[in-house]
């Protein structure tokens, strides 16, 4: 009998030929996962060595403790035997090992179940990303259109939703958001005033800090900061609520009952944000000015009365109304983005988190894009 | 076939006439050559079956065989890649949205999770379809909702929210909502899922009583053998491997006579004594 011993990190693996046609795989010592696994390719080399064996068997007389490490190695050997159609005699192995191998091989691999790693070129990935983005924009616009139709139905008194739901959402995205809007917009006013003060003080024009803060807040910053806060707070909440309802089939239940989920779930949310963001925007404008006044009074030694008078002289009704208009549009965008992501949510709990994240990202991106477009349009119109 | 007109409020508040399912009319449900697919991946093909009046029709098969997906196709929640679903002499697959919506009023659906609206009490859940599609006053709606909840053994739970009751009670509340409009066809998606054997048995009894007392035709998606033999009198078996239905008929007949080993393996829990199953449930 010819024997060949291989030193292995786990247990001891050696090979022998009982006759020219049978390869004996000898397993000795303790086989534990923590000591690493031998490569089944060692068996492959033996099978390729002349004279090529016609069958395979094991010798486990010296085998000590074993765990999944041994099983993993033996599954590899089994796969090699299957591929080569080589008969193997598993009977010398301990009963437990044989039982577990039988269990692992009981259900054959399903055809097509294994995912092949796909290698795509950069150009292909870029193309796919572009198509995905275009599709996302298309879905957003389509959904916006459906919401517009539902709004039209509401205007003629045909849309159906529970008034109590509208009130709950209004409270949630209105009064409940006061705290965070107060903090953020006051600080934005302070930051704007600080930045302006550093420059304007050099020219002795510190009083114009009031103009800077007042105009910035009323025209853009008030609406945009409120929108960003609401995208993170309410847009994500909308996506999570509707996503959860999708996971628990509540949306399906509405559909099969003949109740439009768009009217019943989306309309109150869009309406609530459409109404509440402009109100929050007015509040944000005031808080921003208050932040500027705080800097004016403490750093620039401008009296509060003077600061308020300068602000009143600087801003116009057009600035304020323009800001409110933008805020209302941002409200619709955030609500539609949030609800759309909720409806697109998959059927798992992690998908709800993904939907909330996507709602915040797309909400903020769309708001900033809209802000840029407004800046251009208002400039062209001379507003 | 002469249809019995029934009027019901549509989404725009008007009353629309819809076709009901007279006993001497065509079968209430017919599925013709249905193919279910996700994109280019065909999940099931060549699905053909008929559900007769008063049947408790079981859609059975292993996990991942497409049972719930078939139900979603039948409810119009997913469009088929090919084939049609007919309700009586009404082609549901090719119908206009308004006609579909009207037909849906004849259905009641109990989803796997109960799908109760979490922000509403049980009475509000049951009362919502009544408020939307009938002319009942709020007081009458409350009374009807209380009756429906009492029918499923939830008398006194009208003011509870779904989160305040157990899973079995949520299922029964979902059933109360499903029967709110006295539907002619009831669909159940895995009604026994997540229930203990006693609750599951009680739900089976309830389904039988609803069939007998409401005269409803019932479609049940399940793989619970106890339920299949206890309530089903007609069924199809979906096979994930061959991607089509491989058996059609009374589950007890399939157990006794079907020679397909896949069906036998399923109905006998992989070879458990078949006679024992038949004796216990027959």
Image (cartoon, rainbow, N blue to C red):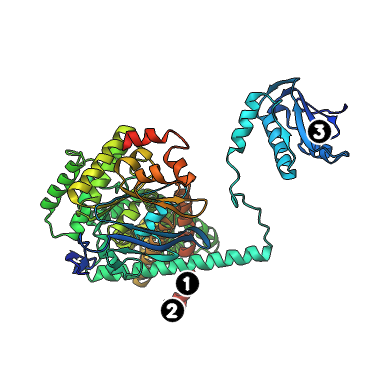
Q: Residue B217 at what x, y percent from top left?
A: 26, 53
- Provide the residue designation for mark 1: A373
In the rendered view, tell whether residue A26 sits above or below residue B233. Answer: above
Q: Quadrant of the C terminus of chain A?
A: bottom left
User: Which is nearer the eye, B74 or B211?
Assistant: B211
Q: Of helix, strand and loop, which one carries label 3? A: strand
Q: Nearer the viewer, residue B41 or B259?
A: B259
Which residue is label 3 attached to?
Answer: A22
Neighbor class of circle 2 (other Cα within 10 Å; few <14, some 14-19, many 20+) is: few
Quarter assignment of residue A122: bottom right
Measure the alpha-carbon separation of dots 1 and 3: 79 Å
- Letter of the chain that mark 2 sits on in the rendering: A
Query: What percent of the width, then of the height, locates residue A87?
Result: 73, 37
Q: Residue at x 20, y 68 (%)?
A: B3
Dot 1 falls on which chain? Answer: A
Q: Nearer the viewer, mark 3 or mark 2?
A: 3
Q: Which mark is residue A382?
A: 2
> Secondary structure beneath disc 1?
helix
């Amino acid at each position: 009998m010819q024997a060949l011993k291989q030193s292995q990190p786990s247990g001891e693996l050696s090979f022998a030929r009982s006759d020219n046609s049978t390869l004996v795989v000898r397993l000795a010592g303790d086989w534990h996962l923590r000591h690493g696994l031998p490569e089944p390719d060692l068996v492959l080399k033996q099978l390729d060595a002349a004279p090529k064996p016609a069958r395979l068997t094991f010798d486990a007389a010296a085998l000590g403790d074993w765990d999944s490490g041994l099983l993993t190695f033996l599954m590899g050997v089994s796969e090699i035997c299957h591929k080569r159609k080589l008969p193997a005699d598993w009977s010398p192995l301990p009963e437990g090992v044989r039982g577990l191998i039988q269990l692992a091989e009981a259900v054959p691999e399903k055809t097509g179940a294994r995912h092949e790693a796909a290698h795509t070129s950069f150009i292909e990935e870029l193309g796919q990303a572009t198509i995905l983005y275009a599709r996302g924009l298309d879905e957003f616009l389509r959904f916006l259109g459906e919401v517009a139709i539902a709004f039209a139905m509401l205007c003629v008194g045909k849309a159906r939703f529970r008034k109590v739901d509208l009130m709950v959402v209004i409270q949630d995205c209105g009064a409940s958001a006061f705290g965070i809007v107060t903090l953020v917009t006051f600080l934005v006013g302070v930051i704007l005033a600080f930045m302006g003060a550093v420059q304007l003080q050099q020219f002795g024009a510190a009083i114009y800090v009031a103009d800077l803060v007042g105009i910035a807040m009323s025209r853009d910053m008030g609406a945009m900061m409120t929108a960003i806060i609401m995208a993170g707070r309410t847009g994500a909440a909308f996506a999570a609520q509707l996503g959860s309802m999708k996971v628990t089939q509540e949306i399906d239940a509405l559909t099969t009952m003949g109740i439009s989920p768009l009217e019943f779930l989306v309309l109150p949310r869009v309406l609530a944000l459409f109404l509440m963001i402009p109100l929050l925007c007015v509040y944000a404008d005031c808080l921003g000015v208050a932040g500027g006044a705080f800097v004016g009074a403490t750093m620039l030694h401008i009296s509060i009365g003077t600061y308020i008078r300068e602000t009143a002289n600087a801003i116009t009704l057009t600035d304020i109304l323009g800001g409110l208009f933008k805020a209302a549009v941002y409200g619709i965008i955030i609500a539609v983005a949030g609800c759309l992501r909720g409806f697109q949510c998959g059927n798992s709990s992690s998908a709800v988190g993904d939907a909330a994240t996507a709602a915040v990202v797309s909400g903020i991106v769309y708001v900033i894009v809209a802000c840029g477009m407004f800046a251009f349009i208002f400039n062209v119109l001379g507003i | 076939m002469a249809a019995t007109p029934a009027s019901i409020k549509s989404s725009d508040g008007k009353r629309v006439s819809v076709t009901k399912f007279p006993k001497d009319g065509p079968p209430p449900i017919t599925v013709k050559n249905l193919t279910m697919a996700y994109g280019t991946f065909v999940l099931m093909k060549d699905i053909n079956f008929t559900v007769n009046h008063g049947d408790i029709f079981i859609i059975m098969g292993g996990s991942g065989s497409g049972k719930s997906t078939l139900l979603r196709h039948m409810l119009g929640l997913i469009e088929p890649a090919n084939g049609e679903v007919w309700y009586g002499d009404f082609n549901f697959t090719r119908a206009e949205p308004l006609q579909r919506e009207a037909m849906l009023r004849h259905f009641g659906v109990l989803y796997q999770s109960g799908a109760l609206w979490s922000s509403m009490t049980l009475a509000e859940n049951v009362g919502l379809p009544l408020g939307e599609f009938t002319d009942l006053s709020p007081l009458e709606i409350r009374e009807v909702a209380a009756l429906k909840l009492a029918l499923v053994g939830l008398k006194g739970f009208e003011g509870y929210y779904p989160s305040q009751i157990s899973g079995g009670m949520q299922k029964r509340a979902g059933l109360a909502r499903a029967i709110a409009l006295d539907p002619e066809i009831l669909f159940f998606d895995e009604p026994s899922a997540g229930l203990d054997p006693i609750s599951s048995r009680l739900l089976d009894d309830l389904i039988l009583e609803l069939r007998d007392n409401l005269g409803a035709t019932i479609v049940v998606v399940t793989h619970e053998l106890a339920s299949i033999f206890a309530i089903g009198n007609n069924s199809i078996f979906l096979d994930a491997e061959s991607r089509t239905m491989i058996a059609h008929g009374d589950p007890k007949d399939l157990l006794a006579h079907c020679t397909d080993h896949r069906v036998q393996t399923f109905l006998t829990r992989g070879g458990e004594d078949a006679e024992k199953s038949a004796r216990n449930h027959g």
